[in-house]
Amino acid sequence: MDITEIIKNAFLFPSKNLETLSIYAILTLLSGAFAIEGIVTLIFGIIDIGNLVIGAIYIIIAIIIGLITRRISIQCIKSGIDLEEKLPDFNWWQSFGTGFSKIVITIYYFLIPAILVVLIGLITNIFGNIMKFAQELYLQAPHILMGTASVRDAIYHAAFPLLISLAITISIGAIIFLIFSFFQAMAEARLAHTGSLKTALNIYGSAKDISRIGVGKVILLSILIFVIYSIIETVLAVIFDQFLVLSILTIIITPYLGLFGQRALGLLYSDIV
């Protein structure tokens, strides 16, 4: 399936599954509400033990609902892989296992690049340069106060090595996280297709799938989806700025765009199934 067909099919797909979209939207709203309420309650729990318990319960409820929404997103990917226009019947019990697997995938494909970025930071001596920056500022502080050294020169002298190491680490880190975001997308498609967490956690397999689909096609589709998201969000921001009451539509629009992206991933993956 070419990219134009993928975008068209994926964008219309949520409108053909209004019941699932409604469930997804309501659950997403509830999950966010319970999470925010839980965090706020936990903060007040510092001075009230009772609030700690209530806050913890809210967080647990948010996690449970989150597992269910993740199951829906995986089902959406699978519908694209199988070229089905309708999502399968919703199964609440299966949601927990699939949702947990998706969380594991997210953590797994985040931790690896995070560890790599920390290692790069050690190589560029970013942590040592932070200490040197702090020490230099401390040493220069009396001279700055007495007017014998300019603030700009003192900070520039202290920050230059730190800025270099930061620039290198952030640049390489951004590339690593971007690459692993593609791996994670393939991992979720592999989970949707096989139902196997072990298969999804196979980084080599995910990388091989990208190669089979075509690196250029994967990148181009990702860019187009990002552009579509950006345009819609920008237009809505302008509208909501003028008509604040319409901002309630984000309850449906955000989940709609989420299912659109997941469906597009499934259709993309269907090329190699």
Image: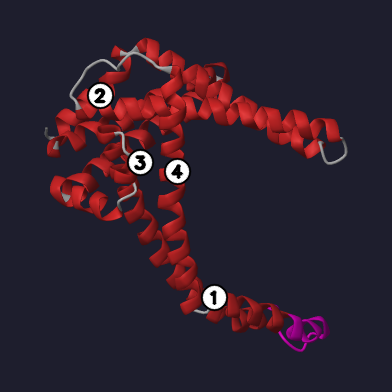
For marks 3 and 2, give the one nearer the viewer: 3
As drawn, is 145 to the left or to the right of 237? right
Membership of 148 in magenta stretch: yes
Element assignment for label 2: helix
User: For the residue carrying disc 1, how many other residues have a C-alpha within 10 Å: few (<14), some (14-19), or many (20+)?
Assistant: many
- Residue at label 3? 197
Mark 1 / mark 2, whichever is N-terminal: 2
For marks 2 and 4, give the one nearer the viewer: 4
As drawn, is 213 to the left or to the right of 69? left
Mark 4 / mark 1, whichever is N-terminal: 4
Q: CA distance from mark 2 to mark 4?
A: 22 Å
Q: CA distance from mark 4 to mark 1?
A: 30 Å
For marks 4 and 1, give the one nearer the viewer: 4
Mark 2 / mark 4, whichever is N-terminal: 2
Residues at badges 4 and 3 in contact (C-beta under 8 Å)? yes
- Residue at label 2? 79
* Kind of residue at disc 2: Ser
User: For the residue carrying disc 3, how many other residues have a C-alpha within 10 Å: few (<14), some (14-19), or many (20+)?
Assistant: some
- Residue at label 1? 126
Q: Which mark is residue 60?
A: none
Mark 3 / mark 2, whichever is N-terminal: 2
* Colour style of the rendered protein structure: secondary structure
State the quadrant of the N terminus.
top left
